[in-house]
Amino acid sequence: MKVLKGKVVSGIGDFAYWIQKLEAWYTKKTGIALFPGTLNIELEFPYDLPANTIRLEKEEYGGTVSISMQPCTIFGHPSFILRTDKNAAGLGIHGLHIIEVASAIKFGDVYGLKDGDMVEVILG
């Protein structure tokens, strides 16, 4: 079992829009109706998602961005690290030291998380 540790950081809200817009696609791929938004976590080191992640290809939904989704758990909740191919290539908004995690809940509200709080992400 691998654990990633990092601190909560604010995001720009872009994934919130896309999770809501592509809700049926995300639910089909993950088996979870994801809350429209992500918990952004800044790691102390860059993290590459493994090659065998769940994929939402841009061609599937007629878009311009493909996304990798790695299963994980935070606070016991089934979740997914989401990363666009652009961010994975180092060309996006976030570097590889930022992971964006989506689940059925809004972690910030449920657990009172704020910027700087430390969290653990359990992979696998």
Image (spheres, grey):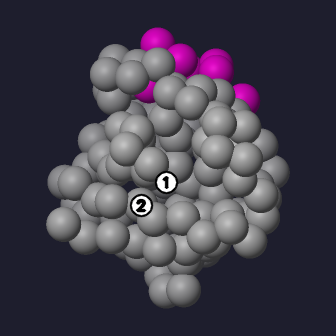
Quadrant of image for the C terminus: bottom left
Q: Is residue 54 left or right of residue 61?
A: left
Q: Position of residue 102 (x, y in %)?
A: 52, 40
Of the pair 62 and 24, the residue shown nearer to us: 24
Majority secondary structure of magenta residues:
helix
18 within the magenta span: yes
Closer to the observer: label 1 or label 2?
A: 2
What's the magenta region?
Answer: 17-26
Question: Residue at 68% of width from left, 67% of height from top?
Answer: 117
Kind of residue at badge 2: Val
Question: Residue at 55% of width from left, 21% of height from top?
Answer: 22
Of the pair 110 and 46, the residue shown nearer to us: 110
Q: Position of residue 92 (x, y in %)?
A: 65, 64
Question: Residue at 45% of width from left, 65% of height from top?
Answer: 120
55 within the magenta span: no
Circle 1 residues within 10 Å: few <14, some 14–19, many ≥20: many
Kind of residue at badge 1: Arg
1 or 2: tag closer to the N-terminus: 1
Q: Position of residue 38 (x, y in %)?
A: 62, 44
Indicate which disc residue 121 carries: 2
- Looking at the image, is 101 positioned above or below residue 99? above
Q: Position of residue 91 (x, y in %)?
A: 61, 69
Circle 2 residues within 10 Å: few <14, some 14–19, many ≥20: many
Q: Which residue is mark 1?
A: 83
- Looking at the image, is 23 positioned above or below residue 49? above
Label 1 element class:
strand
